[in-house]
Amino acid sequence: MVLKIVQAGEPVLRQRARELTPEEIGSEDTRQLIALMRDTMRDAPGVGLAAPQVGVGLRLVVIEDRAEYQAGATPADLATRERAPVAFHVLINPKLVVEDPTPMEFHEGCLSVNGLAALVARARGVRVEALDEKGQPVTLSARGWYARILQHEVDHLEGTLYVDRMETRSLTTQDNHRRHWMGRSTAQVREALGLPERQTAISPEDKS
């Protein structure tokens, strides 16, 4: 069984999700929600899913970047994005802090903005403090694509979508992204779109 992934325009995607209580974290309802979110993410497929994306306003995300999702990328592309497989894990009530504000800009999509992508600058390195599915504290430090996933999913908990951060001129359908921009560097994409070079660093503010 999979859940419906709500799309942009649903109010839940624009509201700050609330924290789970200790009682909720240990409940059967939460265990079932995590299992359904995992199956929904894999069915889509996607590399992350936040509870608001399935209509539930809770501070809960699931993440998994499988090796098979990266099979079509070249070694050079994976190296540029600093992307490697990430095992399935759960983050509850996460707090994210930027550790390396160096901007990394690539096309980014979202399961709740179906069929579109755009250039989005994200911080290269972040730290996340959260609870796992058993309510145990976890601290993660991530760089590159994993850091991007974490920032994207924590944004969902704040009612923020990638379209709020995107380079608007770069908005494209997924099909056109594959046809025109795959294999091209971000600098080449910006030049083709008539965009200036990006120089601004990502603010290292607390993103919790």
Image (cartoon, rainbow, N blue to C red):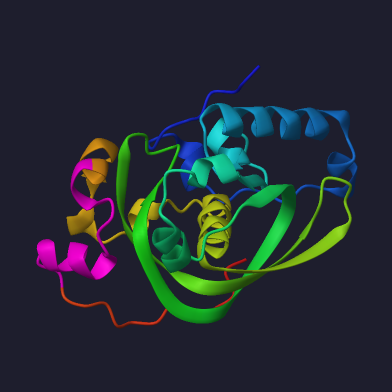
Q: Residue furthest front?
A: 75
From the viewer's perspective, is 139 left or right of 175? right
Image coordinates of residue 139 in percent, x first then y, are 77, 67
Residue at 74%, 51% in the rendered image: 92
Quarter-of-image position of residue 31 = top right
Q: Is residue 191 magenta?
A: yes
Task: Kindly tell me whether residue 160 is visible in this rendering.
Answer: yes
Image coordinates of residue 100 in percent, x first then y, are 54, 81
Image coordinates of residue 85 in percent, x first then y, are 61, 52
Q: Is residue 80 above or below residue 71?
A: below
Image coordinates of residue 109 in percent, x first then y, are 39, 46
From the viewer's perspective, is 166 left or right of 53? left
Q: Which residues are magenta?
A: 179-195
Residue at 40%, 63% in the rendered image: 76
Q: Is residue 99 above or below residue 116?
A: below
Q: Is residue 28 above or below residue 107?
A: above
Task: Kindly tell me whether residue 204 is visible in this rendering.
Answer: no
